Image: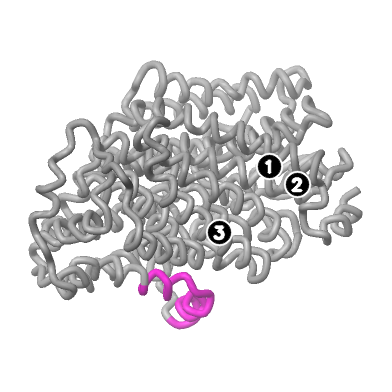
Amino acid sequence: MQWLHNYSALGDSLGLTAITVSIPIFYLFWALAVKRMKGHIAGLTTLLLTIVVVVVVYGMPVNVAISASVLGMLNGLFPIGWIILTAVFLYNLTVETGQFDIIKSSISSLSPDRRIQALLVAFCFSAFMEGVAGQGAPVAVAAAMLIGLGFPALPAAAICLVGNTPPVPFGPVGTPTIMMATVTELPNSIVGRAIGLDMTILALVIPIFMLVVVAGRKNVMGALPAALVAGISYAVTNHLVSQNFGPELPAIFSSFVSMICLVVFLKFWKPATIWRFPNDSDIAEDSTHRYSAGQIIKAWSPFIILMIVMGIWGTPAFKAWVAQELKWFITIPSWPGLDGIVYRAAPIVAVPSKYAASYRMDFFSAAGTAMLISAILSMVVLGLSPAAGVRVFKKTFNQLMYSLITLTAVLGVGFLANYSGMSYTLGLAFATYTGMFFPIFSPVIGYLGVFLTGSVTSSAALFGKLQQVTASHLGLNPLLTISANLFGAVIGKLISPQSIAVACAATGLVGRETDIFRLTVKYSIYLLLFVIVIILLQAWAFPNILPKIAAVMLTQYS
């Protein structure tokens, strides 16, 4: 049996089809923002609704729709759910052993000001985690750290979602940008240079925007020098690395430089007024204990170990060695009920082509496994017994159970949207009905792609070629819309149900996904408008700012 995509299934009308298949998206928005439904219930009901819609509208066979959903749910459990589980487990180990109190004290010793602490953890540290791990780990670890420092749960989640935006196209190890280069058949270095320009601009804005999220507009100026140091040092490093060394290293190098610069700056500068949350503990309480350098290093050792292990796991040489020598993986090269059945159609592809479906569980090379190994090594360093470690792991699993259900449901929706053709229908509708105003909507497509799939990489895979071909047909530089897709996708992570589920799990807000969504959606809209302005300036005011080679590439697709 073969089933061909039909992107204009209703009355041969692309617009009518797009509006109809958007129903699950509107439902999910309503469930989270208006109905304030628990995340796992909203996710599961959205998945069921999506199955009904694609079967009725597209005529997708029921068994094929279920198969696509199950494949997505399995991907939600591994590798993504595995990363979240092990990341929170590592954090919980530091709490169990009492080491997080020392970590909290060491950060507070740099500054008791909550704005500065947010910059250190949610911007600098989380960006490093994005560079080496990605897939939810940065938000999970950074949000848990802020909670441990005494941040209220809801602001902690929002702060981390906002702060973890500039490194995303380059983490882990450049994966989203490399995916975009792959689907558009352009060199990694060229795509990396284009999106690198956008992330350089975003890095200048996000630390200041974070201050607004943390403390409100009236309290920005007091910590502005620190935000400028963190943002400028990150932006300059990001620009130099992305323009000269490709997409693999910008997030790692930029975050490290930013953190060092901010720590050094804090040795010479302090905010005139210390800002704390209204019901915060007294500053004096945070400064009661003074720890030695050895105690501080020991307390930070789980995260030092994590950085080292993740750095090794992220190298191509290590991945190649694991694949060739260890071969610890389970692979299903042809996913039953899906592979060889679904075919993509024109204009997405020139001729109908098979939409392959497979599953591979690379257990040893997975970032979650690297985190587990880091946790085990940390147990040894911290002197925690295996029995105690097992107890903490069970506690962590119970803490995350409903969030894992939400993740599996959301990934099921994302995969079903891809295999049914729903994602392509929506992308084509944007391209068809916007014309020369496409640069305005180009980042919106990336934004929507991440809302659907929870992944910037998936958004690139979904809409990268569409962005490229549409730009060429309109006489625009394809690098403009390709980078716009990534730029918009980065902002989409603020409202992605997957990202929100991660933040809820890390901050103990399971069941309150709607509260985070209602808070972050307004921030995402502000930032999306900012992105659109930048893209319009690149399209009409400064077209030559994009890499020079782009003009040559354009002729290949005209």
Residue holding disc 3: 170
Q: Looking at the image, which is closer to me, 69 or 171?
A: 171
Residue holding disc 1: 2
* Above-or-below relation of 208 to 422: below
Residue type marked 2:
Leu
Count of picture labels? 3
Residue type marked 3:
Phe
* Above-or-below relation of 63 to 243: above
Q: Residue at x 70, y 65 (%)?
A: 189
* Above-or-below relation of 503 to 242: above
Helix, strand, or loop for circle 3?
A: helix
Q: Position of residue 329 (x, y in %)?
A: 43, 68
Q: Earlier in the sequence, mark 2 or mark 3?
A: 3
Q: Position of residue 225 (x, y in %)?
A: 44, 50
Q: Earlier in the sequence, mark 3 or mark 1?
A: 1
Q: Looking at the image, which is closer to me, 347 or 204?
A: 204
Query: Badge 3: how crowded within 10 Å, few (<14), some, or many (20+)?
Result: many
Residue holding disc 2: 480
Q: Position of residue 44 (x, y in %)?
A: 39, 30
Q: Earlier in the sequence, mark 1 or mark 2?
A: 1
Query: Badge 1: how crowded within 10 Å, few (<14), some, or many (20+)?
Result: few
Is residue 320 found inside the magenta-colored segment of the image? yes
Magenta-tinted stretch: 308-325
Helix, strand, or loop for circle 2?
A: helix
Residue 488 in sight in this render: yes
Q: Looking at the image, which is closer to me, 448 or 94?
A: 94
Is residue 341 found inside the magenta-colored segment of the image? no
| Left or right of 388 on screen, residue 356 | right
Which SS does the magenta portion mostly show? helix
